[in-house]
């Protein structure tokens, strides 16, 4: 057997312990720095780490680069196997009534983490791993990373004693791994709170280049997105992925209990609005001016056509004082409506 010795930043240079003797652990890998550090700490201590990454309909950790691209890159850098688990319908179900409530945005962090650990637990059992690690730091996040929440998450996912948080474990009760002598307290971190100095220093020492920021990119924590998400869940029994994707783009207006209006903000969003349009949705576009594509969705859509045309024209390059023609596409039919640019006060009151 070789001595286990870590050479910062170059896993290929780690003098590995005999592969057969390595104990397996499962890491919950997010898009953030902390989970990467947790993986490195465990590798340094001679564990064979496999990663599980969770995607939900509200992740944006790799927006624009293809689904899962960035997290795969991170896993490659860390030299770990990666399993990606998608929580879709069951996540939306949970979000309808999160048992432990929501945070400052629309983030059900305690219930969400419980689901993530459930997925990691399955993987742990599948591959015969000893325990699960995560990059959680005591007190870093208001909702899910205070000691009581950590405790609840462990209990709810039936993982009492099986979750090691290497960055803060020196400040937490001993886990089974510590009691069984698999890990030693002196090798565990004692990081607490929102300060990131120690993590940045560790990143440097471990050779992690361009360390990402603390979070993993969750839209539910963003206040503005939270307002739109709450509105959707208040008005639709079980939102679809299409409805959730629409929340991620455009300016949103709640016109009545049954009807929403969304106005694109740029060319990409215009394309996405067209792609997300479903039978029954009505699309709008100024005929003679550069401007947004807008979408009217809901039972009362037809009664808002004139209003939506006026707002669409208002957000276009059309002179605000003149009339303009708006193309109104409803299924296969395209009508032309002559509209006046809407006055700001007539529509801003509906804006979310
Ligand atoms: S920030 Fe988002 S992804 Fe992270 S635990 Fe909270 S709800 Fe889940």
Image: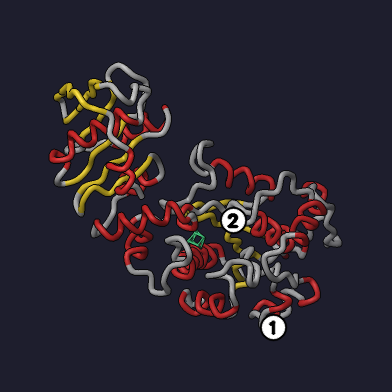
| Residue 122 visible within the image | no
Q: Nearer the viewer, residue 321 or 128?
A: 321
| Residue 343 visible within the image | yes
Disc 2 vs disc 1: which is toward the camera? Answer: 2
Describe the element under mark 2 as helix, strand or loop. Answer: loop
- The answer to whether the beta carbon of the residue marked 2 is less than 8 Å from any atom of ligand 1 is yes
The image position of residue 336, as x and y in percent, is 17, 21
Q: Which residue is identified by label 2? A: 215
Q: Residues within 10 Å of mark 2 (few under 14, many from 20)?
A: some
The image position of residue 303, as x and y in percent, is 13, 40
Q: Which of 116 and 13 is in front in this view?
A: 116
Q: For the point 69% across and 46% down, which residue is it?
A: 77
Q: For the point 61% across and 61% down, which residue is it?
A: 27
State the residue lying farthest toward the top.
288
Return the disc, 2 or 1, that comes first in the chain's sequence.
1
Q: How crowded is mark 1: few (under 14 residues within 10 Å), some or many (20 or more)?
A: few
Q: Which residue is identified by label 1? A: 179
Residue 153 relative to residue 230: left or right = right
Describe the element under mark 1 as helix, strand or loop. Answer: helix
Q: For the point 66% across and 49% down, which residue is it?
A: 212
Q: State the separation of the CA atoms marked 2 and 1.
A: 31 Å
């Amino acid at each position: 057997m070789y001595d286990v010795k870590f050479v910062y930043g170059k896993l290929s240079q780690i003098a590995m312990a005999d592969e057969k003797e390595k104990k397996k652990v499962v890491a919950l890998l997010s898009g953030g720095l902390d989970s990467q550090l947790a993986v490195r700490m465990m590798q340094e201590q001679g564990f064979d780490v496999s990663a599980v990454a969770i995607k939900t309909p509200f992740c944006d950790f790799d927006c624009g680069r293809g689904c899962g691209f960035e997290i795969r890159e991170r896993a490659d850098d860390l030299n770990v196997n990666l399993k990606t688990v998608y929580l879709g319908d069951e996540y939306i179900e949970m979000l309808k009534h999160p048992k432990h409530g929501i945070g400052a945005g629309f983030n059900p962090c305690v219930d969400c983490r419980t689901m993530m650990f459930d997925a990691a637990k399955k993987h742990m059992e599948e591959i015969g791993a000893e325990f699960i690690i995560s990059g959680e730091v005591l007190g870093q996040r208001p909702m899910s990373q205070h000691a009581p929440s950590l405790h609840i998450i462990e209990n709810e996912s039936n993982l009492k004693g099986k979750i090691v948080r290497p960055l803060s474990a020196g400040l937490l009760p001993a886990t089974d791994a510590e009691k069984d002598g698999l890990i030693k307290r002196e090798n565990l971190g004692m990081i607490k709170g929102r300060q990131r100095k120690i993590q940045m220093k560790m990143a440097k020492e471990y050779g992690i280049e361009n360390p990402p920021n603390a979070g993993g990119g969750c839209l539910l924590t963003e206040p503005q997105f939270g307002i739109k998400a709450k509105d959707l869940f208040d008005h639709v029994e079980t939102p679809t992925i299409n409805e959730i994707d629409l929340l991620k783009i455009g300016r949103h207006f709640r016109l009545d209990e049954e009807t929403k209006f969304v106005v694109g903000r740029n060319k990409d969003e215009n394309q996405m609005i067209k792609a997300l349009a479903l039978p029954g949705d009505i699309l709008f576009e100024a005929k003679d001016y550069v401007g947004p594509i807008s979408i009217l969705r809901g039972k009362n859509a037809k009664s808002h056509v004139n209003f939506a045309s006026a707002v669409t024209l208002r957000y276009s390059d059309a002179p605000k004082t003149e009339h303009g023609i708006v193309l109104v596409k409803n299924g296969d039919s395209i009508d032309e409506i002559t509209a006046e640019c809407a006055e700001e006060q007539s529509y801003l009151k509906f804006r979310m």
